[in-house]
Amino acid sequence: MNVFDEPYRWVEAVGQRRDYIEEQLKRSSPAIAQSVAEGILFFTFYRRMPKVFEVYDRIAMGAIGHPADIESARMMLLNAAHVEGFQRSPKDVTLNRLVLFVLAPRLKTAFEEVMAPPLIYRSILAEAGPSPESDTFYLVDYDGNVNQAERQMVAAGTESSRERVLSRLTKSEGFPSLREALPVLMEAFLYGSLGDEELGIDPSGNWADPEKLKSARKKLFEESCPNITLLDREKRILVGVNVQDLKKDAGIS
Amino acid sequence: MMGDWANGGSFLELLGQRQSIGSLGTQGLPGSADAHGAGPGIQATTILAFHYRGGVLVAGDRRATAGNRIMTNRVDKVLEIDGHSLMAIAGSPAFAIEMARVLEHTFKYYRRSQLTDMSVEGKLRILSQLLKENISMAFQGVGAVVPLFVTQDPGTFETHIYFYDILGAHFEGAPFAVGGSGSLEVQGILRYLDRWGNEGGLAGMPEDEAVVLALRLLEAASYFDSATGGIQVRETVYPIVKLLDRSGIRTISEEELKERYRTGVERV
């Protein structure tokens, strides 16, 4: 008797698979994407492998999970996008089509093949439009589930970490500039990665101990690399972002 | 399923896997060369590239002909391949433009998949390979392509001009290279200016003078070569002039060309 003979066992196997993947993802630090005037700002830190990649003109991915699985999904997107862009036109390569018709169905199939190793993968995919209002964001999960949003998107190891990041992001009207967004995203990233105690936040949610915050920032820069890039609205590619100010705030010259 | 996801970095291989390369294959088409062995197309053309003080200027006229008919006077023969490569085309427009599209996607696929730019040598080889695959079309007289390829090493900012023969061999053009039926006049003038012109030769020329020179060269070519469009002020058809310098590729606007033509070509 194996899992395919008995529906209950299959459901149970899928459930265990979900638990296993969630357990693996738990330790990942969040990745944030935010619409800014100049384009889409990707913000995260990494210890071993970069997490933010260009997919096509105007389209980029920020992913958490196992590096080999991120690479598999990245290549699938790259292949589909470049063949489509060559055979038709770069204008026909849209995030909507890539996510709904290429990535999501294949992730779902891979997730439900319970006898094959699971993909440990969760990602933000973003497409920069001509203006911040027309930017598109998707959160794509290992099981092929897709969420769409405007303005910003967060991928994190746990739902509570994701909610903590989101709670610190600006929700006001209008869009910030790159310079304005950087310190906000830095705070949100720290808030999503660490607990209140480590950050010196009092029970009412205020940053009560600036020294603790500063040392958390410093530790972050010392132990990991910033992966902060802009999907430039004009150039339509990922470009590096100057993080000197963030380093200065962290007490690193 | 994982096989499809492997990262080889080769766009041509990826296209091959999907059996969609089609027109770039080596299969021949029935047909024969016209009197000039060039077939319909824009081998009858003038394209040029030379080093000036700030970088490299690449220019081409706008005419496409079939025999003695003018097909159009608004072709773009200087194509941007990536942020630091330009290709100027002479020969069959269908194949040349297709090659440019393959190059563009090959370079960007490589950059994105390998997370690094392709080397200058690698880029030259890809174009050689495309020309080699096109040999049978070239010899049937319907698909010859003779490009100029100008590319900058993104690390050192050194910019080089290369010209190709129809078999795919490439040579560096220092300090200039030309292509197309109107290139004889242009080649002679460029050699003369580089040897006996201003001190420092072409490579010492400032940008504004380089743009005027390009316009003068194309007008001179069109004086002797009926297949070169020259500058048609009444129809406001100006050549394509692009510059590749440390800051990347810049296209000289029609307004600026108009002004340069008025002050540097027409008036003198």
Image (spheres, coloured by chain):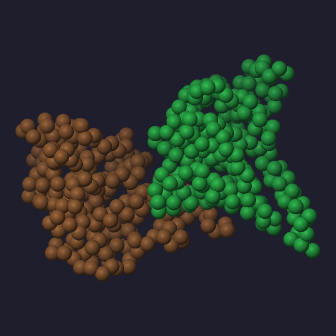
Count the labels in the image.
0
Give the percent coordinates (x, y) of residue B208: 21, 37
> What residue appears at the point 87 percent right and 57 percent down from the top-left corner?
A16
In the displayed structure, would residue A215 be above or below residue B76?
above
Q: Residue furthest left?
A: B268
In the displayed structure, would residue A191 be above or below residue A82?
above
Give the percent coordinates (x, y) of residue B242: 29, 46
Q: Is residue A18 visible?
A: yes
- Locate residue B145: give its quadrant: bottom left
Residue B34 shown left or right of residue B129 in the figure: left
Q: A56 or B120: nearer the eye?
A: A56
Q: B26 or A201: nearer the eye?
A: B26
Image quadrant holding the C terminus of chain B, namely: top left
- Locate residue A187: give its quadrant: top right
Give the percent coordinates (x, y) of residue A184: 65, 27
> What residue appears at the point 72 percent right and 33 percent down from the top-left corner?
A166
Chain corresponding to brown in the figure = B
Q: B264 or A172: nearer the eye?
A: A172
> What residue appears at the point 77 percent right and 33 percent down from the top-left corner?
A164
Residue A248 shown left or right of residue B198 in the figure: right
Give the percent coordinates (x, y) of residue B103: 41, 60
Q: Is residue B200 visible?
A: no
Q: A47 or A165: nearer the eye?
A: A165
In the displayed structure, would residue A167 be above or below residue A32?
above
Image quadrant holding the N terminus of chain B, namely: bottom right
Chain corresponding to green in the figure = A
> What residue appears at the point 31 percent right and 75 percent down from the top-left corner?
B137
